[in-house]
Amino acid sequence: MSDSAPTAGSSPAPTDLTEDRPVYVIGGGPGGLAAAAALRARGVRAVVLERTGSVGASWRGHYDRLHLHTTRRWSALPGLPMPRKFGRWVARDNVVRYLEKYAEHHELEVITGVEVSRIDRAADGSGWRLSASGGRELTGRAIVVATGFNHTPHLPDWPGRETFTGRLLHASEYRSPAPYTGKDVLVVGVGNTGAEIAVDLVEGGASRVRLAVRTVPHIVRRSTAGWPAQATGILVRRLPVALVDRAGRLMARAAVPDLSEHGLPRPDTGLYSRVKEGAIPVQDVGLIDAVKSGRVVPVAAVESFDEDAVVLADGTRVTPDTVIAATGYRRALEPLVGHLGVLDGRGRPVVHGARTPKQAPGLYFTGFTNPISGMLRELARDAEKIAKRVSRKGR
Ligand SMILES: Cc1cc2nc3c(=O)[nH]c(=O)nc-3n(C[C@H](O)[C@H](O)[C@H](O)COP(=O)(O)OP(=O)(O)OC[C@H]3O[C@@H](n4cnc5c(N)ncnc54)[C@H](O)[C@@H]3O)c2cc1C
């Protein structure tokens, strides 16, 4: 993609696109593109600033076997369905194709290679000033921050980490099992990414795969008799947490075998309580079978490293060739907006979607929650809400 994406096209925009101050959207992932398209559909000029050379940068970097866990229909962004030929569970490369097509279809103004480093109030108080790479200073009437929930890989500061003589990498660097054929691998963390990488490794010929578990996860089937787990997530999201926790327990007993004797007991806190704390359930893409058959062996959490050994919480020492840390990401919003008092104690925006912080009107955030109903679906909905609000209020 060129420095500034083409904006010319056959279909004219619905109303005036010549506002002297556009809305700047920071980030050219699904959240930013959806917001820009929804704004444009309401006649508001939106300019997407993307730090890499192309849209969908996060998706380009994900591992090869990744497919959406959410259905094609409920993962599409406003104004463009995903093609049927992508199938129900869309592959990573098709997600990237869709995002490229999306920017083109909506004739979005995307400026690539521009990283925004800080957001401040404009000197005249009527908008927002962005400081960006290349010494750029840009002023927008409103800003949509869409820099991603999974912004900066988080590698815990385990004692002795630097003494480890094996290979230690974050899951964000993992692409395929090929480099690990015949190797003894310890995957740390059993979220969706850790669970899927562990399965990928056994299927790809790793000699031994252990999975270090700090908190036992909730595991759900991606679909049961054709009914996707996401549909249940959408239906229950507004119900009381305790009720959903109870129903989740019953469903898990019916659909997921007891893996206690294989080292994965059932969790003792409810599924929806966990979601509210930020941990979405693990969708089974082979973990249950791999654990049952002993091809993936759950072990205790990692405590520290000691040269060739990894010391686990139960005192066991293991000596894997490689440790893959599926230990999550940070939002890393502090440099951008930390000085504006709009982040909570966990570094997440205090508001999202169409709501803006009281002291920061015109500053929107999208993509910083991890909903049970699917993040892409929520990004799409938030985009519409933000666009409606901006077009009504002018910022
Ligand atoms: C492995 C994995 C699988 C997932 N699977 C699903 C799924 O099946 N279904 C679902 O609904 N959700 C899924 N998600 C969650 C979510 O939908 C995706 O993470 C999605 O990409 C989020 O979109 P986003 O636009 O908010 O963030 P991102 O896609 O991360 O996009 C953020 C963009 O902002 C750019 N950027 C960052 N900082 C700056 C800056 N300072 N200046 C300029 N640009 C910047 C980045 O380069 C990037 O292009 C998954 C997430 C992961 C990690």
Image (cartoon, rainbow, N blue to C red):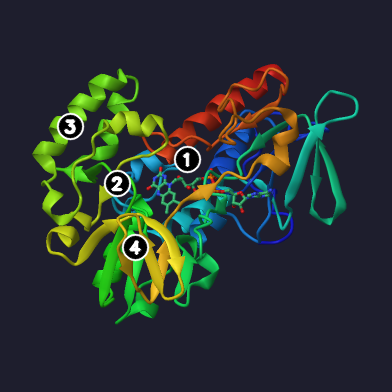
Q: Name the mark on residue 197.
A: 4
Which residue is label 1 attached to?
77
Spatial CA span between label 2 and label 3: 14 Å
Q: Quadrant of residue 236?
A: top left
On screen, 179 above or below 293? below
Q: Which comes sooner in the sequence, label 2 or label 3?
A: 3
Q: Specify the quadrant that holds the N terminus.
A: bottom right
Which residue is label 3 attached to?
249
**Residue 167 drawn at (x, y percent):** 46, 74
Identified by mark 3, the residue type is: Arg
Secondary structure category for the residue under label 4: helix
Residue drawn at (52%, 30%), measured in percent from left and top?
382
Q: Which comes sooner in the sequence, label 2 or label 1?
A: 1
Secondary structure category for the residue under label 2: strand
Q: Is mark 3 within 8 Å of ligand 1?
A: no
On screen, 136 above or below 374? below
Identified by mark 1, the residue type is: Leu
Depth-wise, is mark 1 or mark 3 nearer the camera? 3
Residue drawn at (66%, 38%), measured in percent from left and top?
12
On screen, 297 above or below 139? below
Outermost residue to the front: 315
Is disc 1 surrounded by few (<14), some (14 to 19) or many (20+) residues within 10 Å?
Answer: many
**Residue 133 drawn at (x, y percent):** 79, 54
Secondary structure category for the residue under label 3: helix
Q: Which comes sooner in the sequence, label 1 or label 4?
A: 1
Depth-wise, is mark 2 or mark 1 nearer the camera? 2
